[in-house]
Structure formats: structure tokens, C-alpha cells
Amino acid sequence: MVRFENVSKTYDGQQALSGVDFEAGRGELLFITGASGAGKSTLLKLIYRAIRPDEGTITVNGAAINGMGARHVPGLRRSIGVVFQDFRLLSGKTIYENVALAMRIRGAAERALKPQVMETLKMVGLRHKADCFPDTLSGGEQQRAVIARAIVAEPVLLLADEPTGNLDPDTSAGIMRIFKDINARGTTVIIATHNRDLYTGTGRRIMRLASGKIERLDVG
Amino acid sequence: MVRFENVSKTYDGQQALSGVDFEAGRGELLFITGASGAGKSTLLKLIYRAIRPDEGTITVNGAAINGMGARHVPGLRRSIGVVFQDFRLLSGKTIYENVALAMRIRGAAERALKPQVMETLKMVGLRHKADCFPDTLSGGEQQRAVIARAIVAEPVLLLADEPTGNLDPDTSAGIMRIFKDINARGTTVIIATHNRDLYTGTGRRIMRLASGKIERLDVG
Amino acid sequence: MSHPGSAIAGIWKEKWINLLSVFSIGVGLFILLISMLIVYNLNFFASKLQGRFSMTVYLDDGISAPDLARMQGAIRSNPAVGSVSYISKAEALAELKKSMKDSAYLFEGLDGNPLPASLDIRLKRGDATDAMVRGLAAQIKAMRGAVDVEYGAKFLDTIESVISGARSAGLAFLAALLGGVLFVCYSTVKILFYRRRDEVETLGLLGATAWFIRAPFLIEGSVLGVAGGLLASAAGYAVFDVFLAGFAGALPVFRYMQTPVYFLGLLPLAGLFIGFSGALMALGRIKF
Amino acid sequence: MSHPGSAIAGIWKEKWINLLSVFSIGVGLFILLISMLIVYNLNFFASKLQGRFSMTVYLDDGISAPDLARMQGAIRSNPAVGSVSYISKAEALAELKKSMKDSAYLFEGLDGNPLPASLDIRLKRGDATDAMVRGLAAQIKAMRGAVDVEYGAKFLDTIESVISGARSAGLAFLAALLGGVLFVCYSTVKILFYRRRDEVETLGLLGATAWFIRAPFLIEGSVLGVAGGLLASAAGYAVFDVFLAGFAGALPVFRYMQTPVYFLGLLPLAGLFIGFSGALMALGRIKF
Ligand SMILES: Nc1ncnc2c1ncn2[C@@H]1O[C@H](COP(=O)(O)OP(=O)(O)OP(=O)(O)O)[C@@H](O)[C@H]1O
Ligand SMILES: Nc1ncnc2c1ncn2[C@@H]1O[C@H](COP(=O)(O)OP(=O)(O)OP(=O)(O)O)[C@@H](O)[C@H]1O
Ligand SMILES: [Mg+2]
Ligand SMILES: [Mg+2]
């Protein structure tokens, strides 16, 4: 589903990734871990083409996205659901509207959309917050809203960047169960996290980054 | 240092805290934990008077802050260092400037300020990022910048809201060591967190919130 | 397409700052309206003064009919000339007597008619330059039968030139003002949308196409622009109807003032244009 | 106090949007400058016309010296009157002959002097209303020795009233424009600072006092305002120096145009005022 071949990325002078090679197969659930500043977010951003690599080839869902024309980028991104580390909720819209947006962008009809949005909000425990604005939510509630927005449209690829950083252990476990369900239904899932509870005992691959390089591949 | 007597807070219709009574003694290191949306951030915000209680009395450092005039609020806040859950770094200033700001606000002379800011940045491992702007930092780096800003001016009270949500276990442990050092030098520290690693085995008090009430007091 | 209700909700959520930009656009358009009104009236007065300025040719008592006809033909063919009329000696004396009104009896002792016949030339105000008028005067003076040529008092010339200059200056000013107001309105929308570039970026990262991203901003910009235009119209109506009607008696110039009400209808349209294109420009190219 | 360098750094970090607001303020002030220039010149022309409008009293040949003195006294004491001068019969005839220039020989056969002596009254343009002039005329006509009173041709009256009206309208327009430009500039600063209310809130939560929070915004606002003023000055200078000098020959009105250069010096000051007070108002009361 996702393949990196010798990918490097430097932000004006700051090396963030160097010579990264890996592949996440279709339907895989892959964890990425590593110290703060190791390059986890950079790796995920390269996949949804928020940034472009200096070197190397990135293939997503069979398409090389390096040379992809701007015209095709929205389509690529619509096939991916992203839990942003910095949330990126639109402050002018309610939680319902924020989540519905992901479906509107994918062209969902207004009628079809409501039950699916409410169902997803229920899954993350935010049904009662549907009509609230993001700035009236607690940190963990905002994070769950971002998760709802990422999964509502059933993307073929789900990227989650530190999805439980603001969640208590019980809620985190609940979110992890959701991710596993989604994965079981065929979605490839890549989770960048420092939360050991998420991956220990899962039997899934864990890719450990250190200073922009793949240090180790474990199994949780 | 901090005393809550029967404190309640409702955000238009949404009960966030109800009848909270507790005291954190001078020099104590207190943990607050509880599920997402339990009211941890609300409790901390009441202490630095970002919000006001609907009921009850809050005493900080000997002063009742309910009826405190607006004239005295900046002084109260200058005696407190806060690690905000949502960071609140100023995007137009470098990391150095963001941290230095906390000292400038406290009237520190320009000359005295630089060594102390650099020393604090070094403590949190961000010395090399001093001249970067917040939006070029990784999530964990931003979080450490917020921690540096909160501790640089050696406040008498330190409030940390989910300070390790974006940090890997090793870095978290490092930050926790810093908090303990500061606490050992006399600063009262209150940490709201869901990260069990922070408090297990510390022998400190842990206040567990559930739906805006104190559910249990444990010792870690 | 993002549903239009959410654009309205967005406007409402930030109503104060949006209201401020509506007012800003409204003030700009209102200034434009008032300026247009002033220039329009300047033009109106200028056209009223058209042909008021004249040249008089005093004729020799003994001028022959062919000489007179030739002279009249030469004058008529000059492009600066509007019309020519012949004033006989008798008409001139009658005119003088009339202009002295009650004192006309003073002329009763007069032996014969000392006044000459003349040709009264009305000049085309817009086209007649100083040089042309002087050239025409010299040409006529050289013809047989012309005793003297007298043209516009210096004072009238000055007034005329001031009004004509003010008219050009007014039009230039209006053009500059139009540019200025458009720029300020654009800049208001741009600054208003600038703080929402995060939103634009997020929508892009979520897979929205450029037009999906633009749509709510274009709707918002258009709504703000039309609202600004309506505001300016309302203010303009108040000025036209209440102020001008009420004060027309007090200040004589307002009695002559023309108030073309269709200007008011144009303002919301101008607002729509400004809001829509301002929003489009403010967003610029959306990068992926 | 937050150090001023950081305000400058803040301006630089967001240079494009700040440049836009500088331009916006500059355009506003430039429009104001041009309008002031127009109204200033209107006033200048109007004052040049001062006293141009006159009233003539034709006197009886047999008027007695005391009657004449009484009449002159009465006229002088009228507030609408600027000056009065006596024109004798001989002077009147000389004037008439002079106005007929080369045709003066026509009057040679004249037996005696048919023209009356007169009093030439210059009216104070600004103060003389239609009603006052008519009242004065009636009053003089009733006095012994006055044969007739003649005053301003309707046409001149109209021009005069147009200019005087345009002058009042110009001043009113200028006042409205000043208000409008101030509002638009304030609104630009307000919208510019609006997206930084998070910053204001954060500074407050960190324990900054109200003035500590305001300081960098006030500096920033002042810098933007002064920059806008300088921009308007530069544009104004270009218009004064290049445009007016270059085109003065082409359009006659520009020859009479007054260009008070000190206006230019005032613009950066006006910008400073706008930027500083705009920033102060834009921030409003800082809540704790
Ligand atoms: N836009 C940018 N400009 C410059 N440097 C950047 C930028 N984004 C990230 N970096 C740097 O690149 C490195 C890797 O950043 P990245 O965000 O990928 O780390 P991360 O592994 O996600 O860390 P964390 O766990 O703290 O979120 C960091 O040192 C960071 O400072
Ligand atoms: N400004 C607000 N307006 C309305 N409701 C609010 C506001 N802030 C918080 N709340 C609500 O109050 C409750 C408590 O919020 P609080 O931020 O204190 O939770 P928390 O314990 O910090 O949670 P988390 O661990 O997710 O950060 C939540 O249900 C939240 O939605
Ligand atoms: Mg990251
Ligand atoms: Mg919280």
C-alpha cells in the first residue's frame, strides 16, 4: 500500500529523514515509534503529500506520488484519512460539521451523511458534543473529534499521528479497538505513537525511528 | 498553597466540576488524573484564573482569588508557571523569544535573561532549536518549549496540563525528573496527566477526577 | 460542494469582525457615490454653461451686404463657433436703453445713433481653446468692414477655465478614487481571509479541490460585499432624500443639484463584484 | 516592557499582509490629500472672487452733497457691503468710451454727457445673501437722489452661488471623507490585529499587564501608520512635482492651482495618529 525507497527529507538545513526504505502492505496495521523529533510526523506527511521528499520514491496505493501533478493530489488525499498531531479542527465549524466535512469533500449527499457522522461520533464517545465548537472541548475530546473525521469516510489508508496523546488509558484502548476493527475491514493503518500500551502484545510490526533513520523493526 | 472549597463550574449547561474540595500544601507535588473530559484542565484553569468558579472559594498562595480585582490578576499569574495543554506558543516569535517572554513579563533585565533562557532550553533538550519558529518544531519539541517557558522564571507554583502527551517515554522521564528537581527546590507542582508512568512509584498523592467530582485520592 | 449554509454560519460566528469589514466596504462605496455625485453635477453645470461665452464683432456703418455675408460665412465655418447673430444699430441702441432701464430717458436728447451694428458670436465652450479664439479674432479683424472684435472678459474666461479644469480634475480624481476604493476593499477582504489560511491549508490536506475550498470564501466575500453595497445605498438614499431635500432651501446650490437615483442600485452590484473578485484574489492560487 | 525589536520582527514575519495594510492606509491618506488639495483650491478661487460682485446706484444729477453723504453712510453701515466708491458723470463717460475702445470716436458727436453719476458698491461675497442684497437695494432706492439700483446679473449670481455651494459641499465632503478614511484605517488595523487575539489572550495568561500586552501592538500600529503616511506623501509629492508641473501647460486650471507642500509633512503625522490610536482602539479593553 505504501512503499518508501531511499527517501530523504531536509527542512532548510535540518535533516528529518535520511534513506528510509520500508513497505506497508495492503491491510497491514503498522506502528511507527521513536523519540521526539525522530521524524515520525515527517514520514506520515510525506505519504499524504503535505511535503515532498528531497530524494527517493514514494508509492501510495500503486501510484508514485513524487511526480504527481497538483490536479491529482486532492484525489490521493481523499483516499487517506489522517489524524493530525496538531488536530487541525476548523474552529468556525461545530464538531458535527468538522466531521461531516470529510464526507462532503468526498461528495457524499447531505442525506446519506448524517447517520454516518452521528454513528462515528458515537463510536468515539462524542455524540453529545456534536453541536459544540472545537474550542469548547477538552483536549481529549478534540483529539477524538479528529479521529472521527479521519475514519468517517472509510478511507483505504488511515494515518494516525500520536492519536492518544491526550487520552486516558481506557479511552486509548477504546480508540485502539476502533483502529483494529477498521483494519480488520481492510483498511491499511499506520500509527505513529510513543504510547507502548498501544502496540505491546498486538503481534504487529513496529518500526522504530531514530534521528531520521529506521533503527529497528520489532513485533509488538 | 492551593485550596478549593466546594468549587463548582458549569460551562453554559455543561457541568465540568461540582463540589470540589482539596488542598495542595506548599512544596507538594500533586497529580490529577481522570478520564477525558473529567475536568482536569478546568480545575487548573480555575487556579490561574483563566476562568472563574460558579460557586465555592479558591485560595492560592494565601489569597482568595474569587473576588480578586483585575488589577491583581497579572501578579497572581506571574507567580504561576503553566504548561498549557494546547501549548499556546506565540507563532510570530522564535522559541528563544517565547521562553524569554516569560522572564520579560516578570521584568527581568535583558542581560540577566539570556543565560537563564539558554540553560532552561538545554534542560529540555531544545538548545539547538532556540532560533526556530514554533511551526517548524515537532509536536514533542513544541511541548518541551512550553515546559521551558513555564519553568524558566522559577514560579512558586507550577501547573502542568498533560505535559508529556506528545513525548516518548524516555523524554517523559527526563521531564518528570526536572519537575521533581523544581519541586525539591520548594515549588509546588500540580500535574494533570493520564500517563501512569509519571506517577506510579512516586509515593505522591494522586487525585482522581470523574465527571467533575473527586472520585478517589491515591498514592502513587 | 460545501453547503452554503455553512458559509452563512461562518459569517455569523465572527459577526463583529465581518460587520466591520462590511462597514469598511460600505464607507468606501459611499465615498465613491458622493464623489460620483459631485463630478456628475460638475458636468451637469458645465454643460449648462455651454455656449454662454461670446465674441462680439463691431461692424463699420458702411459695410456692404456681400462683405457681411462673407464675414458671417467665415465665422460659421470656424469649428469653435456655435452660432452667429446679427445685431443692427437700432437693436444695439434698444438693448443699451433696456439695460439702463429707468435711465433710458437719458438717451432721449441723443442726436442720431452712435452705436455700431455688430455680430454676436456664441462660442462652443468645450472646444474653443484660447489660441483658437485669438486666431479667430485676428482673422475677423483683418476682414473688410470689421471695426473691432471684443471677446470674453478675462474674469469670465477664468471662471470658465476653472470649471472646465475642475471637471477634468474631478474625472481624474474619480478614476483614482475608484482604484483606491477597490484596492482598500480588496485589502480588507484579503486581511480578513489571511487569518484563515490555516483553514485553507487544512481543507487542502483533507482532499478538497481548489473550487471546493474557494466556494465558501467566495460566498462569504459576496455576502459581505453586497451588504457593504446595501449599506452605502442606504446612506446614499438618506443623503439624497433627507439631506438634500431638507437643505435645498438653505444652500442655494442644492436647488440645482441633480440626484440620479440609479446610482444607488449600482452600489450593491459593485459590492458583489468587489466581494466576489476580492475574495477570489485574496485566496490566490491554492497550492497542493 | 517587551523589547521594541520584537515588534519589528513581528512586522517582518508577516510582511506581506502588513505591506497590504500599509498600502491601504496610504491609499486612504492619499485620497484625503487629493481631496484637501481640491477643497483648498476651491477656497482659494472663491476668495479670489471675493468682492467681484457689485451693485450700482445711479444718482440724480441734482443730488445734494448731504443727501449723497447720508446715502454713502447708510450703504457703508450695511454688513453685506465691502466698499463704496463714487463715479462722477465724467468718469462714467470716460469708462464707457474706454470700454468701447477703438469705437470711442462714435461718441464724439455727443452733445453733453447723458450718463448719470453713480455709486459703485462691492459686496462681501461670503456674507451677502440674496435677501440682504434685495433689502439693501430697496432701502437705497427709497432714499432721496437715487434714480435706480442695478445689481448682479442673474448669470453671475448663479456662478457665484454654485462656487459658494461647491465650497460648502466640498468642506462637508472633506469632513465625511476624513471620517470615512479614519474608519477604514481603523478597521484595517482592527482586522489585522483580530487574528492575534489568541496572542493577546496568551500574554494575559502568562501574567503580562495590559500595557505590556499593548506595547508591541501600539509600536506595530504606529510603524504601519507612519509607513502608510510616508507612502501617501511620496505619492502626493509625485503628483505635485511631476504631474502638476508637467501638465500645468496642458490644462489651464493647473496654472492657478495652489500646492501647499506642508500638507505632505502632515501625512506621516496623520499616519502615526491613525496607527497608534487605531491599534489602541483595535485592542480595546484587555480583560483579565
Ligand atoms: N517545517 C519544518 N521546518 C524545519 N524543521 C522541521 C519542520 N518540521 C519538522 N522539522 C524538524 O524535523 C525533525 C523531525 O520532525 P517530526 O515532526 O517528523 O518529528 P516527530 O518524530 O514527529 O517528533 P514528535 O514525536 O515530537 O512529534 C525535528 O527535529 C523537527 O524540528
Ligand atoms: N469553554 C468550554 N465551554 C463549554 N464546555 C467546556 C469548555 N471547556 C471545557 N468544557 C467541557 O467541560 C468538561 C471538562 O473539560 P476539561 O477540559 O476540564 O476536561 P479534561 O479533564 O481536561 O479532559 P482531557 O483529558 O480530555 O483534557 C468537558 O466535557 C468539556 O467538553
Ligand atoms: Mg510528530
Ligand atoms: Mg484537559
Image (spheres, coloured by chain):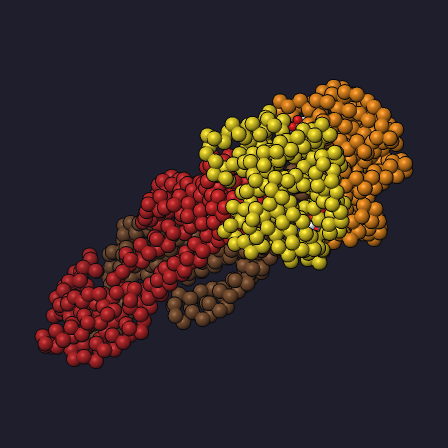
Chain colours: A orange, B yellow, C brown, D red
Closer to the camera in the image, C87 or B157: B157
The quadrant of the rendering that contains the N terminus of chain B is: top right
Q: Give the side of residue A212 with respect to residue D275, left or right.
A: right
Q: Give the side of residue D150 with respect to residue C184, left or right.
A: left
Q: Give the side of residue C123 with respect to residue B188, left or right.
A: left
Percent position of residue A69, x then y:
74, 31
Can residue D166 be seen here? The reply is: no
At a point 52% along the width and 54% down the height, the residue shown is B69
Q: Give the side of residue A126 with respect to residue B129, left or right.
A: right
Quadrant assignment, res B181: top right
Q: Residue furthest right?
A: A185
At a point 71% along the width and 58% down the height, the residue shown is B13
Q: Is residue D7 above or below residue B55?
A: above
Q: In this view, does D77 lie above or below A187?
A: below
Quadrant assignment, res D54: bottom left
At a point 85% along the width and 25% down the height, the residue shown is A219
At a point 62% along the width and 35% down the height, the residue shown is B183
Percent position of residue D273, x then y:
41, 48
